[in-house]
Amino acid sequence: MIVMKFGGTSVNGADNMREVVQTVLESRGEDTETVVVVSAMAGVTDALLKAARAAGAGQANAWEHGLDDLEQRHLDVAHALAAGAEECGLVCEHIDRVFAELRAILQSIAVLGELTPRALDRVASTGERLAAPLVSMAFRAAGIASEPVESSSGVVITDAHFGEATPDDTGTWYGTRTKIRPMLGKGQVPVCTGYIGSTPDGVITTLGRGGSDYSAAILGAALEADEVWIWSDVDGILTADPKIVPDAKVIGHLSYAAAAEMAACGADVLHPKTIRPLIKRAVPLRLKNTFNPAHPGTLISNRYSEHPPAIISTGKLCLVTIRSGEGNGWTPEVTAQTLRHMSHAGIDVLLFLQSAWQNGVSLLVRENDREAAMLTAAADKLAVHLRPGAATVSVIGPEVIRPTLAALGDSAVNVLTISQATTDAGVIVVVPEAEMPPLVRHLHERVSAGQIA
Ligand code: ASP
Ligand code: MG
């Protein structure tokens, strides 16, 4: 059995959904059971979150217009895909029902003027609950038996940490046995919603932004799949970003640990939590390219330990330096509180450095989060300095630290700060964004020459 995940751009419209069906049929072997996991159509989750925030801010009906467009977008896909009027009617009814529910929820958020994390998850879940039935319909239109599965209907069971829920292994094991296994037994292709789950009492949760990869891994582990495949538009994890280094090579095999490290450093083909559920059940993960399906991609499993060093680069980051306000000392409690408040505000702290004198900390956050980070620190009466336009260049591999530092010394790059990846796994360099591409090229040359290995 293979669990295959397709993201928002792969399911963005009727033509793309038909391509998903073709990709599945052409790439799976004969008689291979397949479970498909899908994200919301591109941009839908962002639009939903925006609507929820507008409602929470009491902007009465500011979201109405956007919602009409969103509904029409899904109805258009249904009409384009449906094999007959009856089929179309059923799916359109589902879309109508979901939107009626969504409008009612947004209305009540607006009336209360309060957006709770629980309500936000309920709204955010809508995108996947709309996409899965459409993709499933594309399978049926191609003559393949298929049904959609709402992972929030007792399949992926999680805790109640809304916005970033953690799956419960036992509950999910049971959920997949009772809901998904029987469908496979009947020869159907289940098309499951990524990103969402529910608490044991059925309250909808989400697994964090970009969480559909994680969903595929959770389902693959629970079902003890032979492999989990994540389809995107690149051949897998490369030795560097091919837009910066055109001759970067695909890394054929990686250990779970190395892949997790690369994901944590921002390798965008892989959501950082994806590896976790797979390790326990030793289910291999394969990253594959929908535009080059014959390519084997990158295989991640417990069978490999050696890999060439990879250079992972990420831009659009902001270095936030926080110091104690005038006259106040900095204590470990201030550090703890700062991090706690950042986490409550939904800010992902990608890197954290504390000065030796303990009079402040530097946090690396996404540029999108910089306003929220500033407000959060200001609310704690701390002095904040923002350094937007930052990027990280990480070299991941064993024993790369010394040669990487030597290579940095030979370059003219202006290093903002440096951190270690997990012990022995690599080094993370923070630089101004404009200096990222030349540094990536410089380091990749050293890797190619065997000087960083
Ligand atoms: N639709 C969700 C998001 O936009 C999950 C995903 O795309 O993986 O975050
Ligand atoms: Mg993604």
Image (cartoon, rainbow, N blue to C red):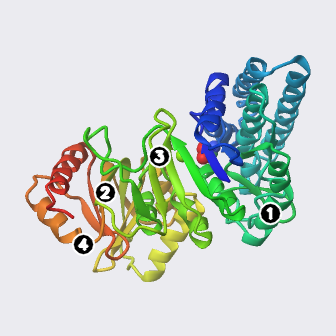
Instruction: Mark 3 and mark 1 in contact? Answer it, CB < 8 Å.
Output: no
Residue carrying label 3: 368
For marks 4 and 1, the one nearer the N-term is 1
**Real-space Cα separation, disc 2 to disc 3, in angstroms:** 26 Å
**SS class, disc 1:** loop
Residue 70 relative to residue 210: left or right: right
**Real-space Cα separation, disc 3 to disc 1, in angstroms:** 29 Å
Instruction: Mark 4 and mark 3 in contact? Answer it, CB < 8 Å.
Output: no
**Which marked residue is nearer to the observer: mark 4 or mark 1?**
4
**Real-space Cα separation, disc 2 to disc 4, in angstroms:** 12 Å
**SS class, disc 3:** helix
**Real-space Cα separation, disc 4 to disc 1, in angstroms:** 43 Å
Quadrant of picture, ligand 1: top right
Residue carrying label 4: 399
**Which marked residue is nearer to the observer: mark 3 or mark 1?**
1
Residue carrying label 1: 199
Residue carrying label 2: 310
Residue 404: image x %, image y %?
19, 64
Residue 279 relative to residue 219: left or right: left
**Which residue is outermost to the front?**
30
For marks 2 and 3, the one nearer the N-term is 2
Say which amino acid is labelled 4. Glu
